[in-house]
Image (tube, rainbow, N blue to C red):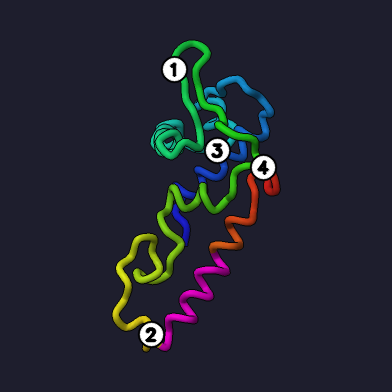
Amino acid sequence: MFSTKGRYALRVMIDLAQQHSEDYIPLKDIAERQGISKKYLEIIAKELVKGKLLEGASGKHGGYRLTRLPDEYSVGEIIELMEGTFAPVACLEKDAKECPRKNECTTFPMWNEFYELEKNFFYNKKLSNIM
């Protein structure tokens, strides 16, 4: 299940994409349009900036803007940044140690197939597809 943090991050990204602007958009404007607490969006925006999905500026004309075009963002990268890996089991996580039971594990193919389906679904959806 995805948390509100991941879902709201996606809404922020969609909101910014819909503005069709290279200007910085104040977080209070996004919060009002989305009906989300500005305080909570500050936490989310900070993580999106840290992940290089947004850039922020402070001051009179400050706010946030996308670092790329909407069709250059996958929904998967946004969700994974906020939620963590899509891997359903530890042995499929990035940089996981090779499981000594991998070759004899009867459930590994099933987990791997599910992981690939989920990952491909979200990574093949672009921000521009859902805005």
Q: Residue under circle 1?
A: 58
Asked if the residue at tag 1 contacts the one at tag 3, i.e. Cβ–Cβ closer than 8 Å, the answer is no
Near mark 2 (Cα within 10 A), the count class, few <14, some 14-19 or many ≥20, is: few
- In the image, what residue occupies the spot 56% across and 21% down? 24
List the residue tagged with mark 4.
71
Name which residue lies at 47% across and 57% down.
2
26 inside magenta stretch: no
Instruction: Pick whichever of labels 4 and 1 is earlier in the sequence.
Output: 1
Earlier in the chain: of badge 2 and badge 1, it is: 1
In this rendering, the label closer to the viewer, 3 or 4: 4
**Residue type, label 3:** Val
Helix, strand or loop at disc 3? helix
Per the model, the C-alpha gap separating discs 2 and 1 is 53 Å
Q: Report how far apart the C-alphas of labels 4 and 1 lie in the structure.
A: 26 Å
Lower sequence index among marks 3 and 1:
3
Q: Residue at x 30, y 68 (%)?
A: 97
